[in-house]
Image (cartoon, rainbow, N blue to C red):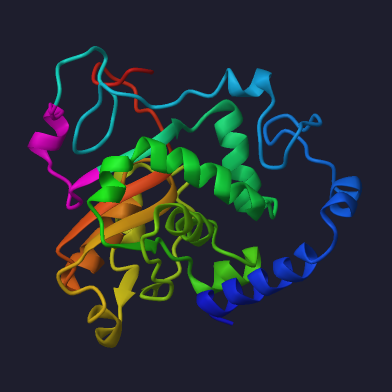
Amino acid sequence: MDEIDASDFRHRVKAGFGAAPAGLMRLVYPPVCSGCGIMVGQAAALCSACWSTVRFIERPYCEITGLPFDHDRGEGLVSPEAIAHPPLYARARAAVFHDGVARRIVHGLKYSDRADLAAMMAAWMIRAGRDAVDDSDVIIAVPLHRGRLFARRYNQSAELGRAVAVLSGKPFLPGVMRRVRATRQQVGLGLKARQDNVRGAFSIAPEQGQRLLGLKVLLIDDVLTTGSTVEAATRALLRAGAAQVNVLTFARVASPGEETLYA
């Protein structure tokens, strides 16, 4: 079962459960905080205590990489790293830092079958990356290799991409980009190892590339760490004919150093 078929199957199952009366579903599955698990008023929400700990990413940040500066340097500024080593993508945006409650939310979506979190996460992403969303024509999610997709049952980035598409009105194109090489988990790898790990991992079939010609793509992933994965995916999209790639993730890892707001 490929990625698009797996996603379609999952949504049919969810639609079936959705036919049950809402009151009955809330009685059987009462809504709990997505951060700590205490009961809350609505599903896929945070309690006030967890909400207060989330570190949202706000300006000032590098207009290309989206990495926050240590102090306000004015609008439109670019970090020295982005000038010295410009990324292939036009801009990258993320909603929150990948720690605490935000990290638990990511893990819930990624490893605990909490696809219901995608709508909340997508709303945060659109708020943080409105400029990237508005400057894009279509949405594509970073794909999983079929082996990992089979193990996880769904692609968390595709769930986010679909939710961003629903909220933004931009078309979502599942199945256009494929992960053609199984890669190691990026966790624990250094920058060079991460780059080598994902080099050549993504591909776009020629017939699918026709759907990208001259378009600006919004590339969706769950977490931005070193940028190695989105750089490799961006390279594949540009080679296939996309005019530009913007990156939007739910979270990003804050790198230590004077150019970051948080060590």
Could you tell me which quadrant the C terminus lies in?
A: top left
Residue most extreme to the top: 71
Q: Residue at the spot x=65%, y=45% of the render?
A: 108
Relative to 46, is 131 above or below? below
Q: Quadrant of the N terminus?
A: bottom right
Name the spot of residue 57 as percent of width and height, x first: 38, 27
Report the residue at 27% width, 49% height from top: 134
Q: Is residue 201 above or below residue 77?
A: below
Q: State the image coordinates of residue 18 (x, y, percent, origin top left).
A: 76, 63
Looking at the image, which residue is at 42% across and 35% down?
A: 95
Q: Quadrant of residue 128?
A: top left
The residue range painted magenta reads 76-91
Can you give x and y, in whole percent of width and height, for residue 195 in the image?
30, 53
Residue 49 in the figure: left or right of residue 138? right
- 219 magenta-colored: no
Given residues 96 and 147, the one toward you in this image is 96
Q: Position of residue 58 (x, y in %)?
A: 35, 24
Q: Relative to residue 47, is residue 160 drawn left or right?
A: left
Q: Residue furthest left?
A: 84
Q: Does residue 151 appear anywhere in the picture?
A: yes
Location of residue 114 with respect to 17 vertically, above or below: above
* Left/right of residue 128 with respect to residue 9 in the rendered view: left
Q: Is residue 224 visible?
A: no
The residue sitting at 65% across, 51% down in the picture is 116
Q: Main secondary structure of the magenta part?
A: loop
| Quadrant position of residue 44 | top right
- Which residue is the extreme one toward the bottom? 207
In this rendering, the count of numbered labels is: 0
The image quadrant of residue 178 is bottom left
